[in-house]
Image: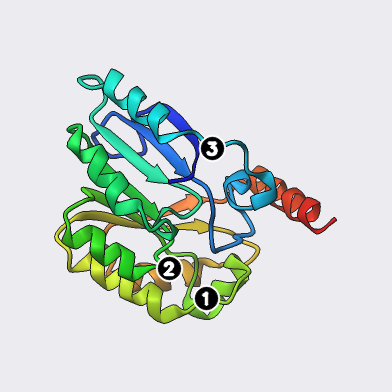
Amino acid sequence: MKLGGMVKFTLIDFPGTPSAIVFTQGCNFRCRYCHNPELVYPHLFTEPYTEEEFFAFLKRRQGTLEGVVVSGGEPTLHDDLPRFLADIKALGYKTKLDTNGSRPEMLEKLLSQKLVDFVAMDLKAPFEKYSLITEVDTNAAVIKQSMKLLQESGVAYEFRTTYDKEVLNDADIALLANMVEGKNYKVQECLPVAKEKAALKVMHEEL
């Protein structure tokens, strides 16, 4: 696993579970408001954390932390994610995955092998507007497949949308809420600072 960073303690990212967050490097989307461009654009990658460092930290925090959030970037791009999650669970931790839902085949594997206890999946926009947010061609079918997998999994999950008012409107949010039948759905504020940061990083990449 290519690990780009870590938050050693959070009470808000994994409901009811004191956790650490580990961030993977690499993403297949280029979202206009991305909060973590240093995990998305390869020229911004820093020297990755080693797994040895990460697991040594988890062993020290056994009995204090209860969970680990695996975020990104996009964790499901990493083929060794199932093994990584299994190693975390072997230490007695619950696991939460943050994903954009673009790799349902990986999500299905994680769910079937009971490697995740909670999944948060981004719903970027109504499907006809998806690429306006992700700035890459996006296959709506794979997003729908991931949504269905979560809804039928029996695993705790939530869908979430970052409300970028330059692209989305209230009708779009209502449509997305209706798509998930109003269940387990959260709307997040789009922070202008994050958008400016992402724009600067893209400009740098193009120079």
Asked if labels 1 and 3 touch by Cβ distance under 8 angstroms, the answer is: no
- Dot 1 surroundings within 10 Å: few (below 14), some, or many (20 or more)? some
- Dot 2 surroundings within 10 Å: few (below 14), some, or many (20 or more)? many
Label ID, residue 138: 1
**Quadrant of the image occupied by residue 63:** top left
State the image coordinates of residue 166 (x, y, percent, origin top left): 65, 63
Q: Which residue is mark 2?
A: 102
Q: Gap in Å between the C-alphas at discs 3 and 2?
A: 24 Å
Q: Name the kind of residue labelled 3 in the image.
A: Pro
Asked if labels 2 and 1 touch by Cβ distance under 8 angstroms, the answer is: yes
- Colour scheme of the picture: rainbow
- Sequence-wise first label, 1 or 2: 2
Height in image: 173 above or below 186?
below
Q: Which residue is mark 3?
A: 48
State the image coordinates of residue 196 (x, y, percent, origin top left): 72, 48
Foreground of the two, 87 or 199? 87
**Quadrant of the image occupied by residue 131:** bottom right
